[in-house]
Amino acid sequence: MTKRILVTGGAGFIGSHLCRRLWEEGNEVICLDDLCTGSAAHFADLKGQDRFTFLQRDVTEPLDIQVDEIYNLACPASPVHYQKDPVKTMKTCVLGALNMLELAGKNGAKILQTSTSEVYGEPLEHPQKESYRGNVNPIGIRSCYDEGKRAAETLFFDAYRTYGTRIRVVRIFNTYGPNMDPEDGRVVSNFILQALRGKPITLYGDGSQTRSFCYVSDTVDALIRMMAQDKTPGPVNVGNPAEITVRRIAEQILRMTQSASSVICVELPSDDPTRRRPDITRAKEVLGWEPKVPLEEGLEKTIAYFRTLA
Ligand code: UDP
């Protein structure tokens, strides 16, 4: 059955893959984005097609349309972008959540919130389970995003308890793949572009901090499974439990691009989490999901994408 699905942030990195997948599955897709960090190029070929609509709008403005499902992704997600206008970032998280919850309520629609591993802050528990309440600095440079996303989770669960809104909440860990914004300062995009351009690879700190990288098709698959299931409102961690240091990812990208770039250490930004790895037991149980794409394969596809931009 064709569903009418709204994807906020649909012109962004994960949003663009999600819109395409939902559209290819035969759904009617409404992609909402203010293009502050997203790109119209990501859906250029979908524009004008049946069952695809683009709305250039800000999620902080109320919206009244008919929908069956809402995926709420709208928010600058990389530290460089969300720190540029931190007050706006908090507004996007909170007002965006409020507006979309209201829209879901009016329509009796299901609504999925893309929360983030950032709700765990500098984690004191490792790997991070959904039951872990996090260790977030409320007044640091990452707080606009971390606390904004935490407040959005609160709004979702209050709407669920108070009004019975049909919520789903996932916490997305680091994701990479084609359509990443070359300008958003993410580690994978930065390192690949630096390697391809023969520029020094910028390790923040000594590169001993860890992250766990999930290829975007796996992430999108988890979002769609989360929306489809009725067992839990969440939260459910979505990420790849394969943990790697930032230094090792630099070495792997240098090897795969056969680059002669040097590696330099620059200052570590404040509140940069030391370790991050999802415990995905719940995702396995509830969604029957775990990542399929190994890092090497995902990086190959991502490097091929960035070659077209370099
Ligand atoms: N990082 C780095 N060099 C870069 C960009 C990022 O060493 O050019 C580090 C950053 O300090 C962090 C990790 O890579 O420890 C992941 O950074 P990213 O911005 O991709 O995501 P997040 O910090 O939100 O996980």
Image (cartoon, helix red, strand yellow):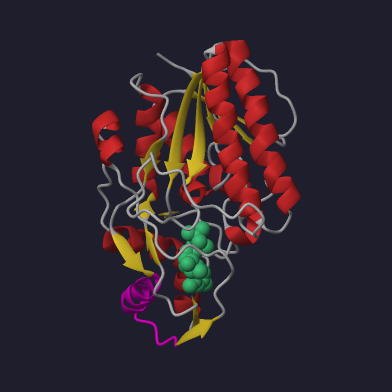
Q: Position of residue 305 (x, y in %)?
A: 44, 61
Q: Hey, which quadrant is residue 258 in on the image?
A: bottom left
Q: Is residue 300 above or below residue 64?
A: below
| Left or right of residue 147: residue 204 | left
Q: Position of residue 273 (x, y in %)?
A: 48, 62
Q: Hey, which quadrant is residue 25 in on the image?
A: top left
Along the line of sight, the residue nearer the viewer: 178 or 283: 283
Q: Position of residue 310 (x, y in %)?
A: 52, 71
Q: Is residue 191 above or below residue 103?
A: below
The answer to whether residue 30 shows anywhere in this view is no
Task: Give the residue drawn at x 49%, y 86%.
Answer: 264
The answer to whether residue 271 shows anywhere in this view is yes
Along the line of sight, the residue nearer the viewer: 22 or 36: 36
Count of all numbered marks drawn on residues in the image: 0
Task: Give the residue drawn at x 66%, y 17%.
Answer: 65
Instruction: Report if residue 252 lies within the magenta region.
Output: yes
Main SS, magenta residues = helix
Instruction: Report if residue 172 lies within the magenta region.
Output: no
Q: Is residue 217 above or below residue 210?
A: above
**What span is in magenta?**
246-262
Q: Position of residue 272 (x, y in %)?
A: 52, 65
Quadrant location, the N terminus: top left
Task: Give the residue drawn at x 51%, y 56%.
Answer: 180
Task: Give the residue drawn at x 58%, y 70%.
Answer: 269
